[in-house]
Image (spheres, grey):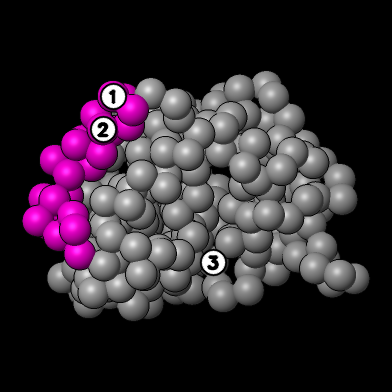
Amino acid sequence: MLLCIENINVYYGNIQALHDVSLTVAKGEIVSLIGANGAGKSTILKAVSGILTPRSGRILLADKDLVGVSPHRIVRMGVSLVPEGRGIFANMTVRDNLEMGAFTRNSREEIEKSVAEVFSLFPQLRERASQSAGTLSGGEQQMLAIGRAMVAKPDVVLLDEPSMGLSPLLVRDIFLLIREINRAGTTILLVEQNAFMALSVAHRAYVLETGAIALTGIASELRQNAKVRAAYLGDVAE
């Protein structure tokens, strides 16, 4: 497994947010985390990226333990986070935002190649390369946030609520791009409130309830699960 989380317990002060959470992500997979607000989905991504440190348990990236490693070193090890709310640098240009994602890389030629690949994937960004990122639409800002993560050439991308604040049409476009990125070889761990879209693109999924794994399985099968459909998809399987 590329990413293996083993029995992690994470706290915010004295409040326990994750209870013995274990999950795996194989190379080339999209794995989705679904659940209600406050279930612990984003907390898992923060633990993997080093923003939060578990009190116990292990987080292994290709057998290297990430627990206690600083966030910038975790990026160098091959993990890129696309945060909830995008986290772009609004006063910097689109190109400069993308190049910020390459701080772990030294070859100017390779950085330019990676930026060109992002522009190929997101033609809208190429057209706006010299614009301030804050002038982009919400959908374009999400593309920029994803592109910035891709420039780092990560082994795994952590996507936190990529559809937040987007129109239904843009949500569809973003998820088509997520699928395309994955098909090109990028492994993705996806947190998404839109359970229908998350289960549509994922290979496997985990359902979180109050900080613990309640259910796991093949994404297409979970879409047909009566409990999942009633709680997260708005209907009940017949």
Q: Main secondary structure of the magenta part?
A: helix
- What is the x, y in percent for residue 170? 19, 68
The residue under label 1 is 109
What is the spatial separation of the Cα atoms under label 2 and label 1, in whole angstroms? Answer: 5 Å
Q: Residues within 10 Å of mark 2 (few under 14, many from 20)?
A: some
Q: Amino acid at mark 1?
A: Glu
Where disc 2 sits, the SS reads helix
Where disc 1 sits, the SS reads helix
Q: Are marks 2 and 1 in contact (CB under 8 Å)?
A: yes
- Quarter holding the N terminus is top right
Single out the mark in the foreground, 2 or 3: 2
Q: Are marks 1 and 3 in contact (CB under 8 Å)?
A: no
Which residue does the image show at 9% across and 56% down from the upper left? Answer: 127
Disc on the earlier residue, 1 or 3 = 3
- What is the x, y in percent for residue 16? 82, 66
Q: Residues within 10 Å of mark 1 (few under 14, many from 20)?
A: few
Total numbered circles: 3
Q: Quadrant of residue 17?
A: bottom right
Which residue does the image show at 18% across and 55% down from the upper left? Answer: 129
The disc placed on residue 112 is 2
Q: Amino acid at mark 3?
A: Gly
Instruction: Tell me if residue 119 can be seen.
Output: yes
**Highlighted range, magenta:** 108-131
Which residue does the image show at 74% across and 39% down from the upper left? Answer: 69
Q: Are marks 2 and 3 in contact (CB under 8 Å)?
A: no
